[in-house]
Amino acid sequence: MRIAVLALQGAFAEHRKMLQTLGVESFEVRQAVDWEQPKDGLILPGGESTVQSKLLKELYLLDALRQDICNGLPVFGTCAGLILLAQHVENDVRERLGTMHITVKRNAYGRQTGSFFTEDNFAGQTIPMSFIRAPYISEVENDVEVLSTVDGHIVAAQQGCQLVTAFHPELLTDTTVHRHFLSIVKETKID
């Protein structure tokens, strides 16, 4: 198994470290030529969604990523990655990947000082969750499964082989969310 990690900005190194801990090979995607490498899945890290979206367009990666995701490439987006995958973002009309049938509220918990840590349920397991200038999902369509809510807000969801979290599992030592993504990749992989 080989996972591509978008490495334009944000917490990509932490995702790669988590994958390494789980014994999974990964590589960084910084330009269009990187995207041409063989891959079984993609991780979109947390960071600044507006910067990442702008760079995806400038580096001619946006359409290529969108096409592969629409064709069934498993993808996991954390925080900014969640925003990039959202079909709708409240009060934001900028172009993004837009492959997941969700509506997102950006910076829903306020500025950096609104960041917090909690433990809550993710797909039936209690896990630690770190929220940093986090969004949340305000609406989901029928084909989206809600995996986690915190204080009444949706913070993790899955649509087919697309997984998103508003929190940052890559910044902690718990591997539950990454293992969940890797199980999606294994189920999707065609040998």
Image: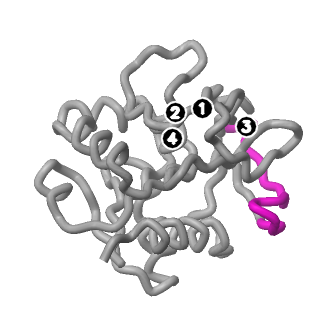
Label 1 and label 2: CA atoms lie apart by 5 Å
The residue at which mark 1 appears reads as 102
Question: Mark 1: which amino acid?
Answer: Ile
Q: Which residues are magenta?
A: 111-127
Kind of element beneath mark 3 = helix
**Closer to the N terminus: mark 1 or mark 3?**
1
Q: Which mark is residue 113?
A: 3
Q: Residue at x 17, y 58 (%)?
A: 34
Task: Give the quarter of the image for residue 62.
Answer: top left
Query: Is label 4 or label 1 in front?
Result: 1
Image quadrant occupied by the C terminus: bottom left
Verify CB contact (< 8 Å) between mark 1 and mark 2.
yes
Depth order, front residue of 13/95 = 95
Q: Residue at x 78, y 66 (%)?
A: 127
Q: Which mark is residue 80?
A: 4
Question: Mark 4: which amino acid?
Answer: Ala
Q: Is residue 7 above or below residue 14?
A: above
Depth order, front residue of 48/19 = 19
Label 4 and label 2: CA atoms lie apart by 10 Å
Query: Is label 2 or label 3 in front?
Result: 2
The residue at which mark 2 appears reads as 86
Residue most extreme to the left: 33
**Closer to the N terminus: mark 3 or mark 4?**
4
